[in-house]
Amino acid sequence: SLGRDGDVHKECLDALKHHPDWWCAQFGAAMYAPDPDRDSAEDSFRQWADRTPGFVHYWYLAKYYRSLGRDSDALAALAEAAEYPLEQVDDDATKVPHGFAFDAATFACKQEEPELVLAICEAWARPRGVYDYQSPNLPAFRAAAFLALGRFPEARAEVSKVLAESQERAIWAGNLHTLESAIDRGDQSFVYDPGLPYEGFMEWSPFPRPELSRVAE
């Protein structure tokens, strides 16, 4: 929060000496590496993701690429993420697994990659561990992907599911009637934007600001 990126990098390197597989230190060591060390730091981060594979760990790698504007690399990392079931792999993760999947699917939608959206949905549909329940948001992303691929009957079926679900309870995916209208028109150029599940959802950082009340304690 003070903008002292060099100190962040040093702290992450020190942390890795004691906790070499800690996601937060791995991300920070790559993200805040000085220019002369950036390539080697990125290689180390990539090797860590390959050594400890999982949906969320490849999401971290994709987020790193996204922060640098390297969208194609981010999409490739999410394709690797989709090869693994959705689960919580780090006790100190800053989102629940469904949050990582929602973000990944949203990014793939905006990048107009419907096949990747469906692959992410497949991983999202088989969660395991503590958060092993089905997400009610899945049909919205499937509907958007099917629309983009011209698979209109499947798109209509999925949007009907999510609209019915949204009548029963609050869900994260928004702009559902806009999506439904695009499906009715057969508009394959439509890019689905599900909106934000909650305020601050996109303001992700490996180092969230501390809550003042906790600091005072």
Image (cartoon, rainbow, N blue to C red):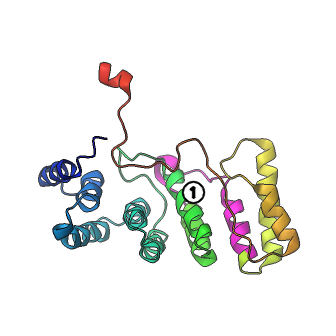
Q: Secondary structure at mark 1?
A: helix
- Residue 105 makes an appearance in the image: yes
| Residue 9 x, y percent position in the rendering | 19, 54
Find the magenta span and give its range.
126-147
Question: Please, is residue 115 above or below residue 18 in the view?
Answer: below
Position of residue 202 in the picture relative to residue 187 (left or right): left
Judged from this view, the residue extending furthest toward the bottom is 150
Residue name at image x 26 percent, y 62 percent? 30
Question: Please, is residue 97 above or below residue 182 in the view?
Answer: above
The C terminus is located in which quarter? top left
Position of residue 26 in the picture relative to residue 145 (left or right): left
For disc 1, the marked residue is 102
Judged from this view, the residue extending furthest toward the right is 184
Q: Nearer the viewer, residue 201 or 37?
A: 37
**Magenta residue check for 138:** yes
The N terminus is located in which quarter? top left
Name the amino acid type tagged 1. Phe
| Residue 199 x, y percent position in the rendering | 57, 41
Q: Nearer the viewer, residue 16 or 190?
A: 190
Residue name at image x 62 percent, y 72 percent? 118
| Residue 139 x, y percent position in the rendering | 71, 61
Residue name at image x 81 percent, y 45 percent? 167
Judged from this view, the residue extending furthest toward the top is 217
Q: Nearer the viewer, residue 30 or 99?
A: 30
Q: Quadrant of residue 214?
A: top left
Position of residue 116 in the picture relative to residue 80 (left or right): right
Q: How many marks?
A: 1
Badge 1: residue crowd in 10 Å (few <14, some 14–19, many ≥20)? many
Residue name at image x 72 percent, y 77 percent? 148
- Residue 156 makes an appearance in the image: no
